[in-house]
C-alpha cells in the first residue's frame, strides 16, 4: 500500500489509526489530515517516543493496510 492511497482516503482510515494509536484525539486526526509526517509527529507527542520509533510504527501500520481498510462498510471501525 502506498501513502498516497492512505492520504487520499484518510477519512475512511481515521478509525484504523485511532484503533492503533488510542491516544490520538479527534483534534489530532483533524490536524494529521492524512499527512504521514504529521501522524508520526503526533505519535511522538502522545506516546513520548523518538522520531525513528514513530516513523517505524507508521511504516508497520501502513504495511498492514489492505483493500478491506477501504471498504466503505468498514470505514468507521
Image: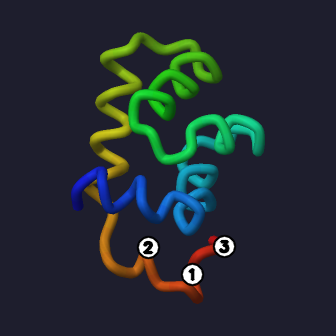
The one of 66 and 4 positioned closer to us in this rendering? 4
In the picture of the structure, the residue carrying the numbered disc 1 is 74
Query: Residue 60, how many percent across, how many down?
Result: 29, 44
In the rendered image, the quadrant that contains the N terminus is bottom left
In the picture of the structure, the residue carrying the numbered disc 2 is 69
- In the displayed structure, 37 sits above or below 19; it is above
Query: Mark 2 and 3 residues: CB-CB less than 8 Å, in contact?
Result: no
Q: Which mark is residue 76?
A: 3
Query: Mark 2 and 1 residues: CB-CB less than 8 Å, in contact?
Result: yes
Query: Residue 10, how many percent across, how many down?
Result: 51, 58
Name the residue at 49% across, 29% down: 38
- In the displayed structure, 67 sits above or below 55; it is below
Query: Residue 66, how many percent across, how many down?
Result: 31, 72
The one of 70 and 31 positioned closer to us in this rendering? 31
Measure the C-alpha gap from mark 3 to mark 1. 6 Å
Query: Mark 3 and 1 residues: CB-CB less than 8 Å, in contact?
Result: yes
Amino acid at each position: 500500500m502506498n501513502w498516497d492511497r492512505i492520504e487520499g482516503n484518510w477519512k475512511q482510515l481515521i478509525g484504523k489509526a485511532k484503533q492503533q494509536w488510542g491516544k490520538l484525539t479527534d483534534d489530532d486526526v483533524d490536524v494529521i489530515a492524512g499527512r504521514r509526517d504529521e501522524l508520526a509527529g503526533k505519535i511522538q507527542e502522545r506516546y513520548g517516543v523518538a522520531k525513528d520509533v514513530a516513523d517505524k510504527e507508521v511504516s508497520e501500520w501502513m504495511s498492514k493496510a489492505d483493500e478491506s481498510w477501504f471498504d466503505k462498510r468498514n470505514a468507521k471501525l
